[in-house]
Image: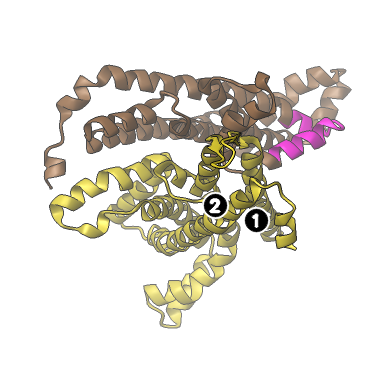
Chain colours: A yellow, B brown
Amino acid sequence: MWDSLVSRLPDWAEPVVDYIIHTGLKNTLIIAAISVVLSVLVGVVLGTLLTIKFLPLRGLIRLYIEVWRGLPIIVTIFLLYFALPSVADETHLSFIDLDPMRAAILGLALWGSAQIAEATRGAVQSIPREQHEAAEALGFGWVGRHVNVILPQASRRLLPPLVSLSVGVIQNSTLASIIGVPEVLETAQRSANRLAVPTVDPATLAIEGGDSHALEIYLFVFVLFFLISFPLTRLAAYLERRLAQ
Amino acid sequence: MDALAAFDWQYIWDHKAVLWGGAKVTFELAAIGIAGSFVLGLVLGAVRAYRIPVLSQLTAIYVELIRNTPILVQIFLIAYGLPKAAKALQFDFFTVACVSLILWGGAFNTENFRAGFEAVPVRYREAAYALGLGPIKTFLNVSLPIGGRIALPSSINTYISVFKNTALMVAISVEELTNVAKQSIDLDFRTWEMIWVLAVFYLTCVWTLSFLIRLLERHLALPEST
Protein backbone atom coordinates (compact mmCIF):
# COMPACT_ATOMS: atom_id res chain seq x y z
CA MET A 1 0.00 0.00 0.00
CA TRP A 2 2.83 2.36 0.94
CA ASP A 3 4.56 1.79 -2.41
CA SER A 4 1.43 2.47 -4.42
CA LEU A 5 0.88 5.64 -2.40
CA VAL A 6 4.42 6.84 -3.02
CA SER A 7 4.29 6.04 -6.74
CA ARG A 8 1.22 8.24 -7.13
CA LEU A 9 3.16 11.30 -5.93
CA PRO A 10 4.52 13.90 -8.36
CA ASP A 11 8.04 13.26 -9.64
CA TRP A 12 9.83 15.66 -7.31
CA ALA A 13 8.15 14.25 -4.20
CA GLU A 14 9.13 10.61 -4.48
CA PRO A 15 12.83 10.94 -3.56
CA VAL A 16 11.93 13.54 -0.91
CA VAL A 17 9.47 11.27 0.88
CA ASP A 18 11.92 8.42 0.54
CA TYR A 19 14.76 10.47 2.07
CA ILE A 20 12.64 11.90 4.91
CA ILE A 21 11.19 8.51 5.85
CA HIS A 22 14.15 6.20 5.34
CA THR A 23 16.95 8.45 6.56
CA GLY A 24 15.19 11.18 8.55
CA LEU A 25 12.56 9.22 10.41
CA LYS A 26 15.01 6.40 11.11
CA ASN A 27 17.46 8.81 12.75
CA THR A 28 14.69 10.62 14.64
CA LEU A 29 13.49 7.33 16.10
CA ILE A 30 17.02 6.21 16.98
CA ILE A 31 17.75 9.52 18.72
CA ALA A 32 14.44 9.45 20.58
CA ALA A 33 14.70 5.79 21.62
CA ILE A 34 18.22 6.02 23.03
CA SER A 35 17.49 9.33 24.77
CA VAL A 36 14.36 7.95 26.42
CA VAL A 37 16.17 4.81 27.64
CA LEU A 38 19.08 6.87 29.03
CA SER A 39 16.64 9.34 30.61
CA VAL A 40 14.79 6.55 32.42
CA LEU A 41 17.94 4.77 33.60
CA VAL A 42 19.55 7.91 35.00
CA GLY A 43 16.32 9.61 36.05
CA VAL A 44 14.93 6.73 38.10
CA VAL A 45 18.21 6.30 39.98
CA LEU A 46 18.60 10.03 40.69
CA GLY A 47 14.95 10.42 41.62
CA THR A 48 15.10 7.53 44.08
CA LEU A 49 18.33 8.84 45.61
CA LEU A 50 16.62 12.21 45.99
CA THR A 51 14.31 10.70 48.62
CA ILE A 52 17.27 10.01 50.92
CA LYS A 53 17.51 12.67 53.61
CA PHE A 54 21.22 13.41 53.14
CA LEU A 55 21.64 17.07 52.35
CA PRO A 56 24.85 17.17 50.24
CA LEU A 57 23.57 14.37 47.97
CA ARG A 58 20.18 15.99 47.64
CA GLY A 59 21.80 19.32 46.85
CA LEU A 60 23.89 17.80 44.07
CA ILE A 61 20.95 16.00 42.46
CA ARG A 62 18.77 19.13 42.81
CA LEU A 63 21.47 21.13 41.03
CA TYR A 64 21.60 18.52 38.23
CA ILE A 65 17.82 18.65 37.81
CA GLU A 66 17.53 22.44 37.93
CA VAL A 67 20.43 23.03 35.53
CA TRP A 68 19.39 20.60 32.79
CA ARG A 69 15.73 21.46 33.14
CA GLY A 70 16.44 25.18 33.23
CA LEU A 71 18.69 25.44 30.16
CA PRO A 72 17.09 25.55 26.73
CA ILE A 73 17.94 22.14 25.25
CA ILE A 74 19.66 23.77 22.31
CA VAL A 75 22.14 25.45 24.70
CA THR A 76 22.86 22.05 26.29
CA ILE A 77 23.44 20.59 22.82
CA PHE A 78 25.77 23.50 21.94
CA LEU A 79 27.66 22.87 25.18
CA LEU A 80 28.12 19.20 24.31
CA TYR A 81 28.84 19.71 20.64
CA PHE A 82 30.92 22.91 20.52
CA ALA A 83 32.49 23.26 23.97
CA LEU A 84 33.34 19.71 25.04
CA PRO A 85 35.64 18.89 22.09
CA SER A 86 38.03 21.68 23.10
CA VAL A 87 38.49 19.92 26.43
CA ALA A 88 38.81 16.56 24.68
CA ASP A 89 41.91 17.77 22.80
CA GLU A 90 43.78 18.71 25.93
CA THR A 91 42.70 15.97 28.31
CA HIS A 92 43.01 13.17 25.72
CA LEU A 93 39.53 12.05 26.73
CA SER A 94 38.62 11.50 23.10
CA PHE A 95 35.28 9.94 24.01
CA ILE A 96 33.85 13.34 24.95
CA ASP A 97 34.55 14.56 21.41
CA LEU A 98 30.98 13.81 20.37
CA ASP A 99 29.66 13.53 16.85
CA PRO A 100 26.47 15.56 16.22
CA MET A 101 24.18 12.55 16.67
CA ARG A 102 25.65 11.63 20.06
CA ALA A 103 25.66 15.24 21.22
CA ALA A 104 21.95 15.47 20.40
CA ILE A 105 21.15 12.18 22.13
CA LEU A 106 23.09 13.18 25.24
CA GLY A 107 21.59 16.67 25.31
CA LEU A 108 18.07 15.25 25.17
CA ALA A 109 18.95 12.60 27.77
CA LEU A 110 20.26 15.21 30.23
CA TRP A 111 16.98 17.12 29.91
CA GLY A 112 14.85 13.95 29.97
CA SER A 113 16.61 12.44 32.98
CA ALA A 114 15.96 15.64 34.94
CA GLN A 115 12.25 15.34 34.14
CA ILE A 116 12.14 11.65 35.06
CA ALA A 117 14.11 12.24 38.27
CA GLU A 118 11.55 14.78 39.43
CA ALA A 119 8.65 12.44 38.53
CA THR A 120 10.36 9.49 40.25
CA ARG A 121 10.85 11.45 43.46
CA GLY A 122 7.14 12.20 43.56
CA ALA A 123 6.19 8.62 42.72
CA VAL A 124 8.50 7.09 45.34
CA GLN A 125 7.29 9.50 48.02
CA SER A 126 3.70 8.60 47.20
CA ILE A 127 4.28 5.02 48.38
CA PRO A 128 3.06 4.73 52.00
CA ARG A 129 5.65 4.42 54.78
CA GLU A 130 4.21 1.04 55.77
CA GLN A 131 5.54 -0.47 52.53
CA HIS A 132 9.06 0.60 53.49
CA GLU A 133 8.64 -0.79 57.00
CA ALA A 134 7.17 -4.07 55.77
CA ALA A 135 10.02 -4.54 53.29
CA GLU A 136 12.53 -3.74 56.00
CA ALA A 137 10.89 -6.26 58.32
CA LEU A 138 11.29 -8.88 55.59
CA GLY A 139 15.03 -8.22 55.68
CA PHE A 140 15.46 -6.12 52.55
CA GLY A 141 18.29 -3.60 52.56
CA TRP A 142 17.88 -0.10 51.07
CA VAL A 143 18.66 -1.20 47.52
CA GLY A 144 16.60 -4.40 47.63
CA ARG A 145 13.72 -2.59 49.27
CA HIS A 146 13.57 0.01 46.52
CA VAL A 147 14.24 -2.31 43.59
CA ASN A 148 11.84 -5.07 44.68
CA VAL A 149 9.11 -3.31 46.62
CA ILE A 150 8.94 0.46 46.19
CA LEU A 151 9.85 1.08 42.54
CA PRO A 152 7.52 -1.59 41.09
CA GLN A 153 4.65 0.14 42.88
CA ALA A 154 5.89 3.61 41.95
CA SER A 155 6.17 2.61 38.29
CA ARG A 156 2.38 2.79 37.92
CA ARG A 157 2.58 6.46 38.75
CA LEU A 158 5.62 6.91 36.50
CA LEU A 159 3.94 5.63 33.35
CA PRO A 160 2.03 8.81 32.35
CA PRO A 161 5.07 11.13 32.72
CA LEU A 162 7.17 8.57 30.85
CA VAL A 163 4.82 8.60 27.86
CA SER A 164 4.68 12.42 27.96
CA LEU A 165 8.46 12.51 28.08
CA SER A 166 8.67 10.29 24.99
CA VAL A 167 6.49 12.78 23.12
CA GLY A 168 8.69 15.63 24.35
CA VAL A 169 11.88 13.84 23.33
CA ILE A 170 10.53 12.96 19.86
CA GLN A 171 9.51 16.58 19.29
CA ASN A 172 12.72 18.05 20.69
CA SER A 173 14.83 15.66 18.62
CA THR A 174 14.21 18.18 15.78
CA LEU A 175 16.77 20.41 17.58
CA ALA A 176 19.42 18.02 16.28
CA SER A 177 18.86 19.59 12.85
CA ILE A 178 20.52 22.77 14.13
CA ILE A 179 23.84 20.90 14.44
CA GLY A 180 23.25 19.04 11.17
CA VAL A 181 22.02 15.59 12.22
CA PRO A 182 19.98 14.20 9.28
CA GLU A 183 16.78 13.61 11.24
CA VAL A 184 13.29 14.36 9.86
CA LEU A 185 13.49 18.16 9.89
CA GLU A 186 17.06 18.29 8.56
CA THR A 187 16.29 15.88 5.71
CA ALA A 188 13.21 17.99 4.89
CA GLN A 189 15.29 21.16 4.90
CA ARG A 190 17.98 19.60 2.70
CA SER A 191 15.30 18.40 0.27
CA ALA A 192 13.75 21.87 0.03
CA ASN A 193 17.19 23.47 -0.47
CA ARG A 194 18.09 20.94 -3.14
CA LEU A 195 14.82 21.45 -5.04
CA ALA A 196 15.25 25.24 -4.88
CA VAL A 197 18.34 25.00 -7.08
CA PRO A 198 17.33 24.90 -10.78
CA THR A 199 18.89 22.16 -12.89
CA VAL A 200 19.82 22.34 -16.57
CA ASP A 201 18.86 19.45 -18.80
CA PRO A 202 22.14 18.65 -20.65
CA ALA A 203 20.35 17.59 -23.85
CA THR A 204 17.96 20.47 -24.36
CA LEU A 205 19.65 23.04 -22.09
CA ALA A 206 16.19 23.76 -20.68
CA ILE A 207 16.15 25.00 -17.09
CA GLU A 208 14.06 22.77 -14.86
CA GLY A 209 12.91 22.92 -11.24
CA GLY A 210 13.89 25.75 -8.95
CA ASP A 211 10.81 25.38 -6.78
CA SER A 212 11.63 24.42 -3.19
CA HIS A 213 8.15 22.95 -2.53
CA ALA A 214 8.74 24.13 1.03
CA LEU A 215 5.03 24.28 1.86
CA GLU A 216 4.33 20.68 0.86
CA ILE A 217 7.51 19.36 2.46
CA TYR A 218 7.08 21.10 5.83
CA LEU A 219 3.36 20.23 5.89
CA PHE A 220 4.34 16.61 5.35
CA VAL A 221 6.78 16.82 8.28
CA PHE A 222 4.09 18.53 10.39
CA VAL A 223 1.60 15.74 9.66
CA LEU A 224 4.24 13.08 10.23
CA PHE A 225 5.02 14.37 13.73
CA PHE A 226 1.32 14.75 14.51
CA LEU A 227 0.62 11.14 13.54
CA ILE A 228 3.39 9.96 15.87
CA SER A 229 2.64 12.29 18.81
CA PHE A 230 -1.14 12.34 18.89
CA PRO A 231 -1.69 8.66 19.81
CA LEU A 232 1.01 8.99 22.48
CA THR A 233 -0.52 12.09 24.11
CA ARG A 234 -3.92 10.33 24.07
CA LEU A 235 -2.27 7.34 25.74
CA ALA A 236 -0.67 9.59 28.38
CA ALA A 237 -4.03 11.24 29.07
CA TYR A 238 -5.72 7.83 29.34
CA LEU A 239 -3.07 6.54 31.76
CA GLU A 240 -3.42 9.70 33.82
CA ARG A 241 -7.21 9.27 34.06
CA ARG A 242 -6.88 5.59 34.98
CA LEU A 243 -4.45 6.51 37.73
CA ALA A 244 -6.80 9.14 39.10
CA GLN A 245 -9.61 6.61 39.53
CA MET B 1 42.42 21.69 31.33
CA ASP B 2 43.94 24.45 29.23
CA ALA B 3 40.63 25.21 27.58
CA LEU B 4 39.20 26.10 30.95
CA ALA B 5 42.38 27.71 32.27
CA ALA B 6 42.46 29.92 29.19
CA PHE B 7 38.95 31.14 29.95
CA ASP B 8 39.03 34.75 28.88
CA TRP B 9 36.83 37.06 30.97
CA GLN B 10 38.17 39.97 28.98
CA TYR B 11 36.64 38.48 25.82
CA ILE B 12 33.17 38.49 27.39
CA TRP B 13 33.70 42.04 28.66
CA ASP B 14 34.85 43.22 25.24
CA HIS B 15 31.72 41.78 23.65
CA LYS B 16 29.28 43.06 26.23
CA ALA B 17 27.59 45.43 23.79
CA VAL B 18 26.85 42.69 21.23
CA LEU B 19 25.75 40.26 23.93
CA TRP B 20 23.50 42.84 25.56
CA GLY B 21 22.00 43.52 22.13
CA GLY B 22 21.21 39.81 21.82
CA ALA B 23 19.78 39.66 25.32
CA LYS B 24 17.52 42.60 24.51
CA VAL B 25 16.12 40.80 21.46
CA THR B 26 15.59 37.69 23.60
CA PHE B 27 13.69 39.78 26.17
CA GLU B 28 11.66 41.43 23.41
CA LEU B 29 10.73 38.06 21.89
CA ALA B 30 9.90 36.66 25.32
CA ALA B 31 7.79 39.68 26.30
CA ILE B 32 5.78 39.59 23.07
CA GLY B 33 5.47 35.81 23.20
CA ILE B 34 4.36 35.78 26.84
CA ALA B 35 1.91 38.67 26.48
CA GLY B 36 0.45 37.14 23.32
CA SER B 37 0.08 33.66 24.78
CA PHE B 38 -1.53 35.16 27.90
CA VAL B 39 -4.24 36.90 25.87
CA LEU B 40 -4.72 34.00 23.45
CA GLY B 41 -4.82 31.43 26.24
CA LEU B 42 -7.23 33.48 28.35
CA VAL B 43 -9.72 33.98 25.52
CA LEU B 44 -9.51 30.49 24.04
CA GLY B 45 -9.44 28.91 27.50
CA ALA B 46 -12.78 30.62 28.23
CA VAL B 47 -14.09 29.49 24.82
CA ARG B 48 -13.20 25.91 25.73
CA ALA B 49 -14.43 26.01 29.31
CA TYR B 50 -17.83 27.46 28.42
CA ARG B 51 -18.16 25.25 25.30
CA ILE B 52 -19.01 28.05 22.89
CA PRO B 53 -20.24 26.11 19.86
CA VAL B 54 -18.01 25.80 16.77
CA LEU B 55 -15.30 28.04 18.28
CA SER B 56 -14.72 25.50 21.02
CA GLN B 57 -14.21 22.65 18.53
CA LEU B 58 -11.92 24.77 16.34
CA THR B 59 -9.89 25.71 19.41
CA ALA B 60 -9.59 22.05 20.38
CA ILE B 61 -8.17 21.24 16.93
CA TYR B 62 -5.72 24.16 17.14
CA VAL B 63 -4.53 23.07 20.59
CA GLU B 64 -4.00 19.45 19.52
CA LEU B 65 -2.18 20.45 16.32
CA ILE B 66 0.25 22.70 18.18
CA ARG B 67 0.83 20.42 21.16
CA ASN B 68 1.53 17.38 19.00
CA THR B 69 4.07 18.90 16.64
CA PRO B 70 7.58 20.24 17.36
CA ILE B 71 7.77 24.03 17.63
CA LEU B 72 10.79 24.00 15.33
CA VAL B 73 8.64 22.44 12.58
CA GLN B 74 6.00 25.12 13.21
CA ILE B 75 8.66 27.80 12.88
CA PHE B 76 9.89 26.35 9.57
CA LEU B 77 6.36 25.98 8.26
CA ILE B 78 5.61 29.64 9.04
CA ALA B 79 9.01 30.91 7.86
CA TYR B 80 9.41 28.93 4.62
CA GLY B 81 6.11 27.14 3.94
CA LEU B 82 3.50 29.87 4.27
CA PRO B 83 5.16 32.33 1.85
CA LYS B 84 4.80 29.60 -0.82
CA ALA B 85 1.05 29.48 -0.15
CA ALA B 86 0.51 33.23 -0.51
CA LYS B 87 2.89 36.13 -1.00
CA ALA B 88 1.00 38.06 1.68
CA LEU B 89 2.15 35.50 4.26
CA GLN B 90 5.81 36.42 3.80
CA PHE B 91 6.97 37.93 7.10
CA ASP B 92 10.38 38.98 8.31
CA PHE B 93 11.87 36.39 10.65
CA PHE B 94 11.43 38.46 13.81
CA THR B 95 7.68 38.45 13.11
CA VAL B 96 7.81 34.72 12.34
CA ALA B 97 9.50 34.20 15.71
CA CYS B 98 6.83 36.20 17.56
CA VAL B 99 3.95 34.49 15.76
CA SER B 100 5.28 30.99 16.42
CA LEU B 101 6.01 31.76 20.09
CA ILE B 102 2.48 33.12 20.57
CA LEU B 103 0.80 30.24 18.71
CA TRP B 104 2.78 27.69 20.71
CA GLY B 105 2.37 29.33 24.12
CA GLY B 106 -1.26 30.16 23.38
CA ALA B 107 -2.11 26.50 22.78
CA PHE B 108 -0.57 25.38 26.07
CA ASN B 109 -2.09 28.33 27.90
CA THR B 110 -5.55 27.54 26.52
CA GLU B 111 -5.39 24.25 28.38
CA ASN B 112 -4.11 25.97 31.55
CA PHE B 113 -6.93 28.50 31.58
CA ARG B 114 -9.55 25.94 30.53
CA ALA B 115 -8.57 23.81 33.54
CA GLY B 116 -8.61 26.93 35.74
CA PHE B 117 -12.08 28.05 34.65
CA GLU B 118 -13.47 24.54 34.89
CA ALA B 119 -12.18 24.29 38.45
CA VAL B 120 -14.40 27.21 39.52
CA PRO B 121 -17.37 25.58 41.29
CA VAL B 122 -20.65 25.98 39.38
CA ARG B 123 -22.37 27.16 42.56
CA TYR B 124 -20.19 30.31 42.57
CA ARG B 125 -21.56 31.24 39.17
CA GLU B 126 -25.07 30.35 40.23
CA ALA B 127 -24.64 32.63 43.23
CA ALA B 128 -23.48 35.45 40.95
CA TYR B 129 -26.50 34.96 38.68
CA ALA B 130 -28.76 34.94 41.74
CA LEU B 131 -27.26 38.30 42.73
CA GLY B 132 -28.33 39.61 39.33
CA LEU B 133 -24.92 39.73 37.58
CA GLY B 134 -25.00 39.14 33.85
CA PRO B 135 -22.82 36.51 32.15
CA ILE B 136 -20.02 38.98 31.31
CA LYS B 137 -19.94 40.49 34.80
CA THR B 138 -20.03 37.01 36.28
CA PHE B 139 -17.02 36.03 34.18
CA LEU B 140 -15.05 39.18 35.03
CA ASN B 141 -15.89 39.28 38.75
CA VAL B 142 -16.15 35.61 39.65
CA SER B 143 -14.72 33.13 37.13
CA LEU B 144 -11.71 35.20 36.07
CA PRO B 145 -10.29 36.04 39.52
CA ILE B 146 -10.80 32.53 40.86
CA GLY B 147 -10.06 30.50 37.72
CA GLY B 148 -7.16 32.80 36.82
CA ARG B 149 -5.56 32.17 40.20
CA ILE B 150 -5.93 28.42 39.79
CA ALA B 151 -4.37 28.63 36.31
CA LEU B 152 -1.53 30.94 37.35
CA PRO B 153 1.21 28.46 38.37
CA SER B 154 0.78 26.24 35.31
CA SER B 155 0.57 29.25 33.01
CA ILE B 156 3.84 30.63 34.41
CA ASN B 157 5.38 27.27 33.57
CA THR B 158 4.21 27.85 30.01
CA TYR B 159 5.78 31.34 30.05
CA ILE B 160 9.08 29.82 31.18
CA SER B 161 8.90 27.45 28.21
CA VAL B 162 8.10 30.35 25.89
CA PHE B 163 11.16 32.16 27.23
CA LYS B 164 13.36 29.10 26.66
CA ASN B 165 11.89 28.63 23.17
CA THR B 166 13.25 32.02 22.11
CA ALA B 167 16.63 30.25 21.89
CA LEU B 168 15.27 28.19 18.97
CA MET B 169 15.21 31.29 16.81
CA VAL B 170 18.91 30.62 16.20
CA ALA B 171 17.53 28.26 13.51
CA ILE B 172 16.05 31.16 11.52
CA SER B 173 18.87 33.61 12.33
CA VAL B 174 16.94 36.05 14.51
CA GLU B 175 19.57 38.06 16.39
CA GLU B 176 18.67 36.83 19.88
CA LEU B 177 21.27 35.89 22.48
CA THR B 178 21.80 32.24 21.49
CA ASN B 179 22.32 33.28 17.88
CA VAL B 180 24.71 36.09 18.83
CA ALA B 181 26.71 33.67 20.97
CA LYS B 182 26.71 31.06 18.20
CA GLN B 183 28.02 33.58 15.65
CA SER B 184 30.73 34.63 18.04
CA ILE B 185 31.71 30.95 18.53
CA ASP B 186 31.92 30.49 14.75
CA LEU B 187 34.08 33.60 14.43
CA ASP B 188 36.48 33.49 17.38
CA PHE B 189 36.22 29.93 18.77
CA ARG B 190 35.81 31.36 22.30
CA THR B 191 33.36 28.52 22.88
CA TRP B 192 33.48 28.14 26.66
CA GLU B 193 33.12 31.86 27.24
CA MET B 194 29.98 32.05 25.12
CA ILE B 195 28.42 28.86 26.48
CA TRP B 196 29.09 30.21 29.98
CA VAL B 197 27.31 33.46 29.11
CA LEU B 198 24.33 31.53 27.71
CA ALA B 199 24.11 29.19 30.71
CA VAL B 200 24.29 32.00 33.26
CA PHE B 201 21.78 34.10 31.35
CA TYR B 202 19.15 31.41 30.83
CA LEU B 203 19.51 29.83 34.27
CA THR B 204 19.27 33.21 36.00
CA CYS B 205 16.10 34.09 34.11
CA VAL B 206 14.47 30.67 34.41
CA TRP B 207 15.33 30.26 38.10
CA THR B 208 14.04 33.75 38.87
CA LEU B 209 10.76 32.96 37.12
CA SER B 210 10.31 29.64 38.93
CA PHE B 211 11.11 31.36 42.22
CA LEU B 212 8.35 33.84 41.36
CA ILE B 213 5.93 30.96 40.80
CA ARG B 214 6.54 29.67 44.30
CA LEU B 215 6.10 33.16 45.78
CA LEU B 216 2.92 33.77 43.81
CA GLU B 217 1.52 30.34 44.61
CA ARG B 218 1.82 31.13 48.29
CA HIS B 219 0.58 34.68 47.85
CA LEU B 220 -2.41 33.95 45.65
CA ALA B 221 -3.41 30.61 47.13
CA LEU B 222 -7.17 30.51 47.59
CA PRO B 223 -8.09 30.83 51.28
CA GLU B 224 -9.71 27.38 51.39
CA SER B 225 -6.64 25.59 50.07
CA THR B 226 -4.25 26.96 52.68
Distance from label 1 to label 2 (Cα)?
A: 11 Å
Which residue in the structure is indicated by mark 1? A232
Q: Nearer the viewer, residue B39 or A216?
A: A216
- The residue sitting at the bottom extreme is A138
Picture coordinates of residue B137, whole percent (x, y): 79, 17
Report the residue at 26% width, 30% height from top: B187
The disc, 1 or 2, on the residue closer to the chain's N-terminal end is 2
Q: Position of residue A108 (x, y in %)?
A: 43, 51
Instruction: Specify the principal SS of the magenta part.
Output: helix
Foreground residue, A79 or B77?
B77
As for residue B6 lying within the magenta part, the answer is no
Asked whether, in this view, residue A1 is left or right of residue B160, the answer is right
x, y (%) of residue B170? Answer: 43, 32
Q: Any magenta on residue B55? A: yes
> For mark 2, what is the residue?
A170
Which of A205/A145 is in front? A205
Residue at the (57%, 29%) spot, across then down:
B79
Does residue B214 appear left or right of residue A212 in this picture? Answer: left
Q: Residue furthest front?
A: A203
Q: CB under 8 Å between callouts 1 and 2?
A: yes
State the residue at coordinates (30%, 51%): A60
Span shown in magenta: B45-63
Q: How many marks?
A: 2
Amino acid at the residue labelled 2: Ile
Question: Dot 1: within a 10 Å radius of its alpha carbon, few (fewer than 14), some, or many (20 or more) residues?
Answer: some
Q: Type of residue at label 1?
A: Leu
